[in-house]
Every structure is written in C-alpha cells, then in structure tokens.
Image (spheres, rainbow, N blue to C red):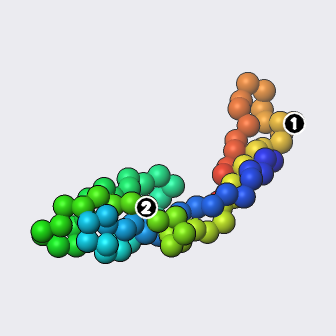
Amino acid sequence: TRVGDVKPELKVATYLCDSCSKDHYQKIDTLDFMPLQKCEKTMACTGQLELQIRSSKFVKFQEVVIQEVSEEVPIGSIPRTIKVH
C-alpha cells in the first residue's frame, strides 16, 4: 500500500481578460485540462486570459495505491493493484 501526498486539485479555473477585465470560469472534471486562452465574452474583445489562482477553486486530493499481497499471487503472475482517489 502506498499513500501519496495531499495535493491541491483544480476544480474551477478562474481567468481574467487583460482587455475587457471580464471573469471567465472553467469547470474541470479531469486531472488534466486545457487552459482557456482567448476572451469570448464579446465578439469585439480579442484579449488574452490570465489564470487567477487566488479566485480559482481547489480541493484536497490524495491517491492511495493498494497492491495484492505478493505471497498470495500465483508464481509467474504480477500482483494486482487498484488506485483510490
């Protein structure tokens, strides 16, 4: 059994447009995501978005890996593992 460190996991990314100063929110459902780049609040705005760490939403995340006891594994087999988040 291995227990990882407690880390922050991003759930809602908050961005600020450098041109029109409007906020953008991006809900994150996976461990990896593609950050937003361009403002889409109005057709006329062509500003770039900057991630705002302080106003983004994070939750605590920890991964635990449980492995089958090696004595119970048949010879020539690999112990099975399961990851728990």
Which residue is at the far top?
76
Image coordinates of residue 45 in percent, x first then y, are: 18, 67
Q: Quadrant of residue 36?
A: bottom left
- Residue with the mark numbered 2: 51
Which comes sooner in the sequence, label 1 or label 2? Answer: 2
Please state which of residues 41 and 64 is positioned toward the viewer in this rendering: 41
Neighbour tally class for label 2: few under 14, some 14-19, many 20 plus, Cα within 10 Å: some
Which residue occupies 22% across, 67% down? 40
Asked whether, in this view, residue 75 is left or right of residue 36, the answer is: right
Quadrant assignment, res 20: bottom left
Classify residue 19 as left or right of residue 33. left
Instruction: Tell me if 23 is positioned left or right of 46 in this view.
Output: right
Q: How many marks?
A: 2
**Cα–Cα gap, marks 1 and 2:** 49 Å
Please report the residue visible at 73 percent of the width from the left and 37 percent of the height from the top. Answer: 79
Report x, y in % for residue 2: 78, 47
Q: Name the amino acid, label 2.
A: Leu
The disc label shown at residue 71, or none: 1
> For residue 77, what is the image quadrant?
top right
Q: Position of residue 63 (x, y in %)?
A: 69, 54
Q: Is residue 13 above or below residue 2?
A: below
Residue 37, horizontal then vertical, whole percent: 31, 56
Front residue of this view, candidates 20 and 40:
20
